[in-house]
Image: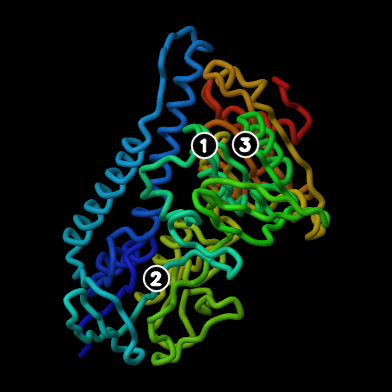
C-alpha cells in the first residue's frame, strides 16, 4: 500500500491547488516544496511584482496631484521601503498557503524531490537526510526557471533576472531590459516611475509580442511618453561588463550601436524546471521544447504520473497552472475536465494595463475566419475621464457568421479587472448583441465593453 494517494511535487499555484482539490476529494495527500509554499508566483512573481506596481502607480498619481486639484510637495520614493512592502506581502501570502495545507490535512514535506521510480520519490532534506515516499499518483508542478544564453551571462550584480530585481534595495540609475514581454514591460514601468532611466529592447517587431498589434502600440506610445526608450526589431549581440557599467551591443537593420547602463535585466523567456527530478528513472518523456509532454488530462506517458503548470508548457501563467491542477485531480478521481486553452486569459500589469483573451485580429484572419471588430476608446468614457485615465480602448472580435465572441483585447487603466466579464461571455458563446444588451452600471470602465460590442454591430451610442 502506498504512503499517499496523491503526491504533489511543487507548491506553486498549480501544485497547492492540486493538493487541496485532491484532499477535498478524500485523497490522502502530500506536497513537496524545497523553498517556500506558494512557489515562484506568490514569492517571486505575480504577487510581489503587483505590490511594486501599485507603489509605482500611487507614486505617479502623487506626482500629478495638481491635475486633480490637490497639492503634494516634495514627493519622493523610498525605494528600500517599497521593496520591503513587496516582500512583506509575499511572505504573508506564503503563510496563508501554509494555513490552507493544515486546514485540508495535507502533509507538507520540505526538501528536493527526485524519482526513484514511477511510484517512489526520494526527498532530500536541508539537513542532509533523505526519505523515500510512495504514491499511487504523482503530480509534477515544479514550474520554470529563467532562460539564459551564453552571450547574456546573468551574474546577479550587473546583469540580473527578475528575482534579483525583486530583492534589490538599491534603485539603479539606468537599466536596459532585454525582452518586451510582461516581465520586461512591468519592471520597465516600475523602475521608470521610480526614477530609473529605462531602455527596453525587443528582437521582434512589437512590444508585448503575443498581444494584438493595436493594443501593443498603445502601450509603446505611453511608455515613450514616460521617457522610456523602446527598441523593437533589435537584437542584443553581446554584453560587455565594466566597473559600474554594462556596455550593451545592439544591432538593428545591420546597424550596430552600444548603450551603456548600470544594470541589465534579462527577460527572454523560461525553461521547464526539470533538473534533478530524475524523470528518466520514472520513464517520463519531454517534448521537443524540453517541457514535460502531457495529454488533455495532464497525464504523462507514464500511468499515474501527471504534470501541470509551467513545467508542462503552453501558456506559462499561474491561473492556467491552477486549472491544470484541477484537471489532473479530476482525472485521478474519475471526473475528467480538460482545460480549454483557447479561453486562457492573459494580463500585463504595467500602466496602461493589458488584458486579452482568445484570438487576436491577425490570428483570426490567418485562421481564415470572417470577422467583425468593435472598438471603444476610453477617451469617450465618462468614468475614464473622471479618474484621469483616458488612454486605451477595448477591442472585441466576433465571428461574422455566428456573431460569437472569439477575441477580447483591452488596454487601459484596470483593464485586467474588466476581462472576467468577457471570459464568461466567451465561455457561454455570447454574441455581440447579448453583450451589448447586458446592462452595465454607469459610470464604470466596464461600459466600454458594452460600447465595443455595439460598435461591432454599427450602433455604438457614445463614439
Q: Quadrant of residue 151?
A: bottom right
Looking at the picture, does residue 421 appear above or below residue 242?
Answer: above
Determine whether, in the image, residue 162 is placed left or right of residue 240: left
| Label 2 vs label 3, nearer the camera | 3
Q: Nearer the viewer, residue 4 or 182?
A: 182
**Pointer 2 or 3: first along the chain:** 2
Q: For this rendering, which residue is in front, 395 or 167?
A: 167
Looking at marks 2 and 1 on the same chain, the residue that comes earlier in the sequence is marked by 2
Q: Which residue is mark 2?
A: 142
Residue receiving disc 1: 196
**Badge number at residue 228:** 3
**Which SS class for mark 2?**
loop
Q: Secondary structure at mark 3?
A: loop
Among the 4 quarters of the image, the one containing residue 77: top left
Q: Dot 1: what SS?
A: loop
Q: Are marks 2 and 1 in contact (CB under 8 Å)?
A: no
Amino acid at each position: 500500500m502506498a504512503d499517499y494517494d496523491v503526491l504533489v511535487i511543487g507548491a506553486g499555484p498549480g501544485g497547492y491547488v492540486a493538493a487541496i482539490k485532491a484532499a477535498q476529494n478524500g485523497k490522502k495527500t502530500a506536497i513537496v516544496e524545497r523553498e517556500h509554499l506558494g512557489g515562484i508566483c506568490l514569492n517571486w512573481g505575480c504577487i510581489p511584482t503587483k505590490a511594486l506596481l501599485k507603489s509605482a502607480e500611487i507614486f505617479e498619481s502623487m506626482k500629478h496631484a495638481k491635475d486633480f486639484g490637490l497639492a503634494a510637495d516634495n514627493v519622493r520614493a523610498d525605494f528600500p521601503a517599497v521593496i520591503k512592502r513587496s516582500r512583506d506581502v509575499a511572505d504573508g501570502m506564503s503563510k496563508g498557503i501554509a494555513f490552507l495545507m493544515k486546514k485540508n490535512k495535507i502533509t507538507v514535506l520540505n526538501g528536493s524531490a527526485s524519482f526513484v521510480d514511477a511510484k517512489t520519490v526520494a526527498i532530500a532534506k536541508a539537513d542532509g537526510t533523505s526519505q523515500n515516499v510512495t504514491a499511487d499518483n504523482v503530480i509534477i508542478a515544479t514550474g520554470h526557471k529563467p532562460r539564459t544564453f551564453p552571450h547574456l551571462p546573468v551574474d546577479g550584480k550587473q546583469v540580473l533576472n527578475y528575482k534579483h530585481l525583486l530583492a534589490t534595495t538599491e534603485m539603479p540609475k539606468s537599466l536596459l531590459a532585454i525582452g518586451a514581454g510582461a516581465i520586461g514591460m512591468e519592471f520597465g514601468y516600475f523602475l521608470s516611475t521610480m526614477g530609473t532611466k529605462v531602455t527596453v529592447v525587443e528582437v521582434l517587431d512589437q512590444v508585448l509580442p503575443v498581444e494584438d498589434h493595436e493594443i501593443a502600440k498603445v502601450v509603446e506610445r505611453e511608455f515613450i511618453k514616460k521617457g522610456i526608450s523602446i527598441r523593437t526589431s533589435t537584437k542584443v549581440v553581446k554584453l560587455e561588463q565594466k566597473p559600474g557599467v554594462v556596455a550593451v551591443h545592439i544591432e538593428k537593420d545591420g546597424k550596430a550601436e552600444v548603450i551603456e547602463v548600470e544594470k541589465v535585466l534579462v527577460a527572454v523567456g523560461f525553461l521547464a524546471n526539470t533538473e534533478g527530478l530524475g524523470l528518466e528513472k520514472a520513464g517520463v518523456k519531454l517534448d521537443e521544447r524540453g517541457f514535460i509532454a502531457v495529454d488533455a488530462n495532464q497525464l504523462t506517458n507514464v500511468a499515474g504520473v501527471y504534470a501541470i503548470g509551467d513545467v508542462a508548457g503552453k501558456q506559462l501563467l499561474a491561473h492556467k497552472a491552477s486549472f491544470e491542477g484541477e484537471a489532473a485531480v479530476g482525472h485521478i478521481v474519475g471526473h475528467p475536465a480538460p482545460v480549454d486553452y483557447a479561453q486562457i486569459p492573459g494580463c500585463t500589469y504595467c500602466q496602461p494595463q493589458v488584458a486579452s483573451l482568445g484570438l487576436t485580429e491577425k490570428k483570426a484572419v490567418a485562421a481564415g475566419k470572417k470577422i467583425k471588430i468593435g472598438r471603444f476608446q476610453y477617451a469617450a468614457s465618462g468614468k475614464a475621464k473622471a479618474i484621469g485615465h483616458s488612454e486605451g480602448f477595448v477591442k472585441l472580435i466576433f465571428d461574422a457568421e455566428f456573431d460569437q465572441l472569439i477575441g477580447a483585447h483591452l488596454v487601459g487603466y484596470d483593464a485586467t479587472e474588466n476581462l472576467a466579464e468577457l471570459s464568461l461571455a466567451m465561455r457561454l458563446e455570447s454574441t455581440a448583441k447579448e453583450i451589448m444588451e447586458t446592462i452595465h452600471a454607469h459610470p464604470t470602465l466596464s461600459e466600454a465593453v458594452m460600447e465595443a460590442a455595439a460598435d461591432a454591430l454599427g450602433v455604438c451610442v457614445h463614439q
